[in-house]
Amino acid sequence: MPTTKKENFYFGLMMCSGMVLFMTFYNLFTNGLLGTISWKGILVQLMMIFATAFLLEIFIVGPVAKKIAFSLPYDKSKKVLVILSVAFCMVSGMVLCMSLYGLVTAYLSNRLTGESLVASYFSLVLKNFIFAFPLQLLIVGPLVRFLFVKFVKGKAMTESLS
């Protein structure tokens, strides 16, 4: 989809925004915190989570995931296979990293129950992956690709024609 660094930045920004929004509310809901945190608190959480996720996506997870996805043995001329492999690698990397972020924030706010940190981490990873992968494939990914082509790619094409 994105072909330039600028397009890659916008695409990452859009994808990260969608995933952070859905995943934050999912985690607040599953942890029973949705009614207990003020909207101001949720907004602060969203901004902190977005900043962390976006930096991870741009500098660490994104480049590594793309390198892994494109090194796998499959027919790269089939767009759907490229999308699936990149999505799987990106979601896997982001879930591993952001679950660690969630574990640290839960620990710092004394919200961890008697489980060990390792058990809590793997529980978070499983719970987040089960929601994040279908979310990426069925909702956020297609929506972002549509909006990206319509507003970013389309705008770039009309500017280059002028």
Image (cartoon, rainbow, N blue to C red):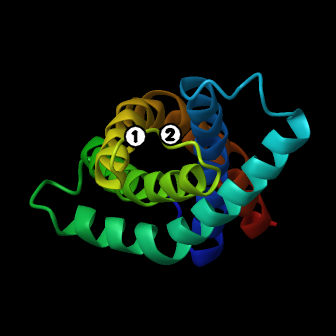
State the image coordinates of residue 78 (x, y, percent, origin top left). 24, 47
The residue pinned by badge 1 equals: 114
Residue at the (39%, 56%) spot, across then down: 90
Quadrant in which the C terminus appears: bottom right
Check the image and name the residue furthest to the left: 73
Residue at the (53%, 59%) spot, across then down: 104
Q: Circle 2: is it few (<14), some (14-19), or many (20+) Cα within 10 Å? A: many
Decide if residue 156 is on the left or right side of residue 80. Answer: right
User: Is residue 3 visible from the viewing direction of this image?
Assistant: no
Decide if residue 49 is on the left or right side of residue 133. Answer: right
Decide if residue 156 is on the left or right side of residue 135. Answer: right
Decide if residue 27 is on the left or right side of residue 95. Answer: right
User: Is residue 125 visible from the viewing direction of this image?
Assistant: yes
Relative to the observer, which residue lies in front, 116 or 54?
116
Relative to the observer, which residue lies in front, 3 or 124?
124
State the image coordinates of residue 150 (x, y, percent, origin top left). 69, 43
Asked if 33 appears above or below 136 in the picture, the reply is above
Asked if 64 appears above or below 74 in the picture, the reply is below
Q: Secondary structure at mark 2?
A: helix
Q: Amino acid at mark 1?
A: Gly
Q: Which disc is residue 131 wearing?
A: none
Asked if 14 appears above or below 31 in the picture, the reply is below
The residue pinned by badge 2 equals: 141
Residue at the (33%, 52%) spot, across then down: 92
Relative to the observer, which residue lies in front, 139 or 5?
139
Q: Amino acid at mark 2?
A: Gly
Q: Secondary structure at mark 1?
A: loop
Whether the residues at callouts 1 and 2 have beta carbons within 8 Å, the answer is no
Tell me which corner region of the image, top left, top right, bottom left or bottom right, holds residue 43.
Answer: top right
State the image coordinates of residue 11 (x, y, percent, origin top left). 60, 57
